[in-house]
Amino acid sequence: MGRLLPAVVFLLLIVHISGCAVSNNPQRTILRQLQKGIIKDDTSFVYQLPYEKNTVHLLVQGYFSHFGHKERAALDFKMKRGTIVCAARDGIVVRVKQDGNKGGWNKKYRPFGNVIVIQHSDSSRAGYWHLQYNSAMVKVGDSVKAGQPIALSGKTGYTLFPHLHFIAWRFNKNGQWQQVGTRFKTSNGIRYLKPIKRYRNG
Ligand SMILES: [Zn+2]
């Protein structure tokens, strides 16, 4: 018993740590290394920032952050309601939801989140969330160019404050979706974005 107790405590500790620590998604580690430049990536597609040229926005949450993105390779750009959201990459609009007119920090608001989804030529997709009610400037089937205005930002759905939630994903061989981190062109060069930094589109 004298030996068993420390072992049990140790086990509980491990369970506890793994249960509430950060995501153990392998992509998290890879993205951290890409952000720091430990892994070099000069082959993947370079996205444009999803807002107008010469405007600056603060990235409030990055990939796999603790608050809301624990399991998501998503980016949150702080934006005043009514800011023009632009396509980050050429593609075809495959989904438009703009009838949501409520938002707040409660799961009950999730169904009200307006979104536009654009499919790219390599069949990956990007989603633009929390858009303002009835603000879509494109419809399903439209071809869009990177930099083209597609809607206004807002605060619809499950969200604490007005922002644009951006996420890119692709489908693997089994048809399951897989989120992907992406590089962006910024005024300071091409990079994987980090939270609590401002990025200028230019
Ligand atoms: Zn988000």
Image (tube, rainbow, N blue to C red):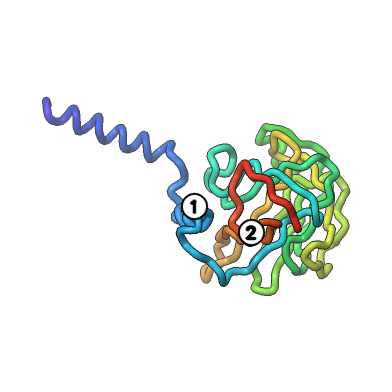
Q: Amino acid at mark 2?
A: Ala
Looking at the image, the residue that sits furthest to the front is: 188
Residue shown at 77%/68% (left/top)? Answer: 92
Q: Is residue 1 above or below residue 102?
A: above
Residue shown at 25%/29% (left/top)? Answer: 9
Dot 1 falls on a residue whose secondary structure is: helix
Residue 104, percent from left and from top: 73, 33
Q: Is residue 115 above or below residue 10?
A: below
Between 184 and 169, the residue placed more toward the observer is 184
Q: Amino acid at mark 1?
A: Arg
- Quadrant occupied by the N terminus: top left
Disc 2 designates what residue? Answer: 168
Q: Is residue 177 rendered to the left or right of residue 94?
A: left
Residue 200, percent from left and from top: 73, 52
Dot 2 falls on a residue whose secondary structure is: strand
- Whether residue 111 is visible, yes or no, is no
Looking at the image, the residue that sits furthest to the top is: 2
Residue 98, percent from left and from top: 83, 49
